[in-house]
Image (cartoon, rainbow, N blue to C red):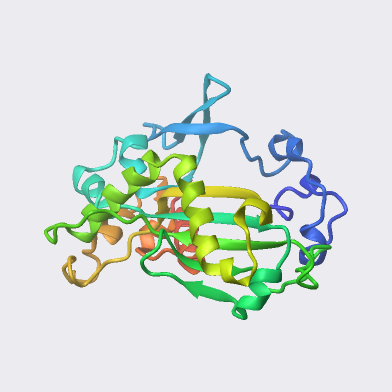
């Protein structure tokens, strides 16, 4: 972002100081910039016009607005695209709806100090039968004025990865379980999350002197009901011929609209998103006009 819109962080050199830089978010949507990032703007429609243009409709502060361009890259959740772009062919819409997101809950817990975790003597803990299956600490990375804890006396953050635990009869597919789990993530209250967090940390660290009532200073719960891209599972998904998998059909270029996201690669990680972005830009560069 800094390279695209330099005024957002004036004076910043790069990776070595970006973490501690002061950001001017008002500079993100300035008319005098070559790149503009619309703030608080939810896209509600994308369509290709008869004169080979693309209109993007969005809502900003309750007001409907539109922007028109020569090209468009949709880099969002596959399941939303058929509703944003109803012009797409029905088989493509069906393909886009095939893979649900894999829901997760990422929780950050700030501890008063690291004494109990230091006595535990490990960097991460796996708890397959608990609400949070992985507990881990941040890697000791020093960058841009940010430093990891220097001793057990310093405050520390514990990251807790939660996988929704839904009732299973044995007849559900992986996709059906993901959809059920997504609703569970939405329906669970913060009070329930907090109780589970405190109970689990107390169970893991209690014998090392940890007291959740005094040693936890802050909790953030990041619910990802639409989390990771769906990756095909051999137990439930067929082996498609090359070019015939749902993610390949779903990402087909439609006129001046290209689709780029990790969903379009059926793979949930950064390299997939980068590959998809490169593909989409190359598609549009070959589109005349």
Residue 283 x %, y %: 43, 57
Res 164 seen here? yes
Residue 93 x %, y %: 25, 45
Q: Quadrant of residue 39?
A: top right
Q: Is residue 38 above or below residue 283?
A: above
Which residue occupies 80% across, 72% down?
A: 150
- Farthest residue toward the top? 63
Residue 47 x %, y %: 38, 34
Compared across the picture, whether 85 is left or right of 238 comes to right
Q: Nearer the viewer, residue 32 or 179?
A: 179
- Farthest residue toward the right? 11
Residue 196 x %, y %: 46, 53
Q: Nearer the viewer, residue 136 or 279?
A: 136
Res 282 seen here? no
Compared across the picture, whether 34 is left or right of 88 comes to right
Which residue occupies 76% across, 68% down?
A: 149
Q: Is residue 218 above or below residue 160?
A: above
Q: Nearer the viewer, residue 128 or 176?
A: 128
- Count how many numbered circles sit on residues in the image: 0
Compared across the picture, whether 171 is left or right of 159 comes to left
- Farthest residue toward the bottom? 121
Which residue occupies 31% across, 50% down?
A: 181
Compared across the picture, whether 187 is left or right of 168 comes to right
Q: Is residue 125 above or below residue 57?
A: below
Which residue occupies 24% across, 49% down?
A: 92
């Amino acid at each position: 972002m800094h390279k695209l819109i330099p005024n957002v962080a004036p004076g910043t050199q790069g990776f070595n100081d970006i973490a501690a830089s002061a950001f001017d978010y008002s500079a993100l949507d300035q008319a005098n910039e070559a790149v503009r990032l619309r703030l608080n703007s939810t896209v509600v429609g994308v369509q290709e016009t008869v004169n080979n243009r693309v209109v993007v409709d969005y809502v900003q502060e309750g007001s409907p607005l539109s922007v028109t361009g020569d090209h468009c890259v949709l880099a969002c959740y596959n399941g939303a695209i058929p509703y944003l772009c109803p012009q797409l062919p029905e088989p493509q819409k069906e393909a886009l709806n095939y893979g649900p997101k894999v829901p997760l809950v990422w929780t950050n817990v700030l501890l008063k100090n690291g004494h109990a975790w230091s006595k535990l003597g490990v960097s991460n803990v796996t708890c397959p039968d608990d609400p949070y299956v992985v507990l881990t600490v941040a890697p000791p990375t020093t960058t841009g004025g940010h430093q990891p804890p220097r001793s057990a006396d310093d405050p520390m953050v514990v990251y807790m990865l939660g996988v929704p635990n839904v009732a299973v009869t044995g007849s559900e597919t992986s996709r059906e379980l993901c959809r059920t789990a997504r609703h569970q993530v939405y329906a669970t209250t913060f009070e329930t999350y907090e109780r589970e967090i405190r109970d689990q940390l107390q169970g893991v660290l209690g014998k090392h002197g940890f007291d959740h009532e005094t040693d936890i200073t802050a909790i953030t719960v990041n619910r990802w009901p639409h989390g990771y891209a769906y990756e095909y599972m051999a137990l439930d998904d067929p082996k498609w011929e090359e070019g015939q998998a749902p993610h390949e059909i779903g990402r087909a270029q439609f006129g001046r609209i290209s689709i780029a996201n990790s969903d379009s690669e059926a793979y949930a990680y950064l390299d997939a998103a980068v590959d998809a972005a490169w593909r989409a830009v190359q598609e549009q560069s070959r589109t005349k006009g």
